[in-house]
Image (tube, rainbow, N blue to C red):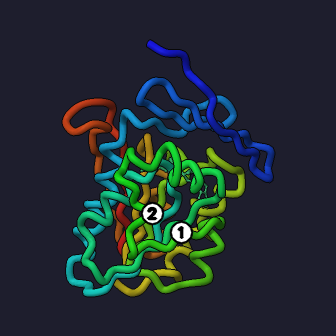
Amino acid sequence: MKALVQIGTVIANDGAKVVLFQRDEDFQIRVDGLELMNSRTHGSEEDLATLSVERLKNRTNPAVLIGGLGMGYTLRAALDVLPTEAKVVVAEFFEAVVEWNRGPLGPLAGRPLDDSRVVVRVEDVRELVRKDRPYDAIILDVDNGPSAFTVKSNQHLYSEHGLKMLFASLDPGGLLALWSSYPDPWFERRVSKVGFELETKRVRARGKKGPKHTLFFATKP
Ligand SMILES: C[S@@+](CC[C@H](N)C(=O)[O-])C[C@H]1O[C@@H](n2cnc3c(N)ncnc32)[C@H](O)[C@@H]1O
């Protein structure tokens, strides 16, 4: 087995160090030494997208916001099931992550950034939810669950105030979907308190294998 090679680094404004590693065909993104994601395990990231789009069936030209890009698996899975008239805005905090996806990470998910339905914005997803609303769906996988991991400011997204902002950014009947590596009953309570109807699903990381991850699907009534 080849050694793990560092092929890219970016420092966030709060000092977090985001590093892209490669070993053979596999890639890994770490934040301050802890794994944010890898290219071997992405079944639940894809489930997040397909199960979200299933919930948008009665919408003709859905406007979907995906945050963030990562290695593009959620984006690819969404594009594969969305109609041709859909509009997908992808919010990615780091320019470097977008460049990695246009470079070495591109083939992993079949270069989803090349799809004409996609607009990629190098911006904090928190800013975008305020600007370009309303969306039919906001699909979030920016941390390892509903607590800040990548950058400290993400904490706001999962607070009552942040959830109210997300609620306001959705059309009636719209969907907020969130990926998590763990269940979080306190987060569930906050989601319901804000007015969402919540459904929580546990899915496997890799098809029928691997650890279980949690997907939160919160619908605005
Ligand atoms: C776990 S990865 C996403 C994985 C992605 N679902 C996939 O399938 O490859 C998290 C991504 O969100 C980005 N990110 C973190 N915080 C963000 C924010 N506030 N706004 C936009 N992107 C953010 C990170 O830079 C990283 O690219």
Q: Nearer the viewer, residue 58 or 18?
A: 18
Spot the residue most to the front: 103
Name the residue carrying label 1.
Answer: 120
Q: Residues within 10 Å of mark 1 (few under 14, many from 20)?
A: some
Q: As drawn, is 93 to the left or to the right of 56?
A: right
- Residue 182 x %, y %: 43, 41
- Residue 83 x %, y %: 25, 77
- Residue 171 x %, y %: 41, 86
Q: Is residue 148 above or below residue 216?
A: above
Q: Quadrant of the N terminus?
A: top left
Q: Quadrant of the C terminus?
A: bottom left
Q: Is residue 96 above or below residue 64?
A: above
- Does residue 194 appear in this view? yes
Q: Residues within 10 Å of mark 2 (few under 14, many from 20)?
A: many
Q: Is mark 2 within 8 Å of ligand 1?
A: no
Q: Specify the label residue 113 is tagged with.
A: 2
Q: Nearer the viewer, residue 199 or 82?
A: 82
Spot the residue most to the top: 1
The mark that comes first in sequence, 2 or 1, is 2
- Residue 32 x %, y %: 69, 34
Q: Is mark 1 within 8 Å of ligand 1?
A: no
Q: Amino acid at mark 2?
A: Leu
Identify the residue at image location x=28%, y=69%: 53
Identify the residue at image location x=32%, y=38%: 205
Identify the residue at image location x=54%, y=53%: 142
* Distance in Å between CA atoms under marks 2 and 1: 7 Å
| Badge 1 element | strand
Q: Amino acid at mark 1?
A: Val
- Does residue 192 appear in this view? no
Q: Are marks 2 and 1 in contact (CB under 8 Å)?
A: yes
